[in-house]
Image (tube, rainbow, N blue to C red):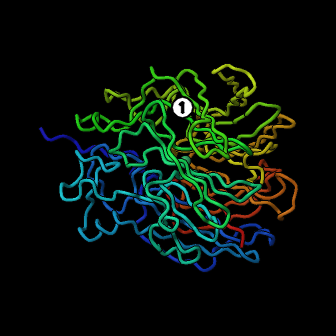
Amino acid sequence: MAQAQRRNPFLEGNFAPLSMECDAPSLPIIGEMPRELFGSLYRIGPNPAFEPRDPHHHWFFGDGMVHAFHIENGRVAYNNRWVQTPKLQAERGAGRSLYGTFGNPMTTEPDVIGGDSGVANTNIVWHAGRLLALEEGHKPMEVDPRTLSTKGYHDFAGRLEGPMTAHPKICAETGQMIGFAYAPGGLIGDGRVLNYYLIEADGTLARSFQVPVPYFAMVHDFMVTRNHVLFPIMPLTGSLERAMKGGPFFAWEPDLPVKIGIMRRDATGPESVRWFEAEASFVFHPMNAWEEDGRILCDVAQYAAAPLFPFADGRAGDPSKATAHLTRWTFDMKGATSNFAQAQLDDLEGEFPRIDDRHAGLAYRHGFFGFRTAQSTSGSFDGLAHIDHRTGRRTTFQLPPQDAVAEPVFVPRSADAEEGDGWVLSVIYRGEPRTSELAVFEASNLAAGPVARAQLSHRVPFGFHGNWRQG
Ligand SMILES: [Fe+2]
């Protein structure tokens, strides 16, 4: 009997890719776009150019597409482009997809096994005069900040020999960009080592060395404070051997502990790494981390179990554990304990935490994140939240159930404005007309709704991250 074709949920609704690239010189605006906003908001996410060949196609493996909103004098121009990765170019040449999810050799076209399967789809950052489209298994791809045309891999004058995280941290005090790679030899390596990278404010890769880790895990993000770097090793494990037997390359193994390695930022080798331990949990994204009285504190969006990934035997994960809550970790650097405290700060199901980046790695007051209510029908987050850690007050803005927000990006009113004085930008999906818009909120009053909305006639598919570049 013929099997009914089952659609992949990550190719439907607003997960479905766009098939076009465009330039819109001036978007219609509802409300008034603040005149002080001068710069570009970049967003990036997966947008598969061809029907995936892998029956286990994963959302994280779509070809990266950049969406840019350029704001000046109250007007907004928009453009979108695929990042022209070697994978996309090879598949365009073939007229079909060639690579299995994460380059899995079991589902990749034999001719290209071991080839470059980079998708440049996870984050887009501006540092040292370059716009870099990032994906954690490969080197950064440089993109033109205005035309979004792809310039090619940026390897820091040959000093970056392998991949780099999609979540480098830019130090608010020094302008240094700090990064790492959890699979420096690619996913076919044994993964029990990561590479640490220190890039100076002028873009020079000044230091890199290897740090041994307890086991091979997907390390999506990390934390940096004024004096320390934190590597969270959490049991979303990677195994080529498992994949070669037909199992998942990445899988949730809750019997393994969480290990957090804390290293001094001025280290020139891994000797100073101190390991802390806890029961299994998972974090994709921290909100911020900082130092206080001999302690290191981290606010993170913490899950009881990694979402979006199966167990090692292929069984689907437990959806009741696949929700994140803002949680504070406290590491006592003066004591001898290897434990650390964990305390939930908020009861919303929240993700994509962001801050006023001028406080990255420093004590901070204001945090912003997306949250999901039980009413949401889009498959994504239907509200934005602002948490004021000083007062404990939380304010929210909630959309109709079929609509969704993207990661909130904070833009200060001016370079010397007080922390949190400015705007929150989020690309909102409207489920009814199936279009998207750039929404601008007063950061101090999310509940009032957007002060300006720049409207597209198409939708921006659900993506991952974005950042602001001041004009
Ligand atoms: Fe991320």
| Residue sitting nearer the eye, 420 or 4 | 420
Disc 1 residue crowd, few under 14, some 14–19, many 20+, Cα 10 Å: many
**Within 8 Å: ligand 1 and the Cβ of disc 1?**
no
Residue depicted at 43% across the width and 36% down the height:
192
| Residue sitting nearer the eye, 38 or 135 | 135
Residue 291 image-quadrant placement: top right
Q: Is residue 398 visible?
A: no
Q: Amino acid at mark 1?
A: Phe
Give the side of residue 317 with respect to residue 188, left or right: right
**How many numbered marks are there?**
1
When the figure is inspected, residue 445 is found, relative to residue 350, above or below; the finding is below
Q: Is residue 271 visible?
A: yes
User: What residue is shown with label 1?
Assistant: 282
Residue 331 image-quadrant placement: top right
Give the farthest residue toward the left.
1
Q: Tell me the element at label 1.
A: strand
Give the side of residue 7 with respect to residue 148, left or right: left
Give the side of residue 10 with respect to residue 208, left or right: left
Residue 429 image-quadrant placement: bottom right
Q: Position of residue 146 (x, y in %)?
A: 58, 77
Check the picture and name the quadrant holding the N terminus. top left
Check the picture and name the quadrant holding the C terminus. bottom right
Q: Position of residue 84 (x, y in %)?
A: 41, 69
Give the farthest residue toward the bottom.
25
Give the side of residue 273 with respect to residue 444, left or right: left
Q: Position of residue 119 (x, y in %)?
A: 41, 58
Residue depicted at 77% across the width and 40% down the height:
387
Residue depicted at 73% across the width and 30% down the height:
345
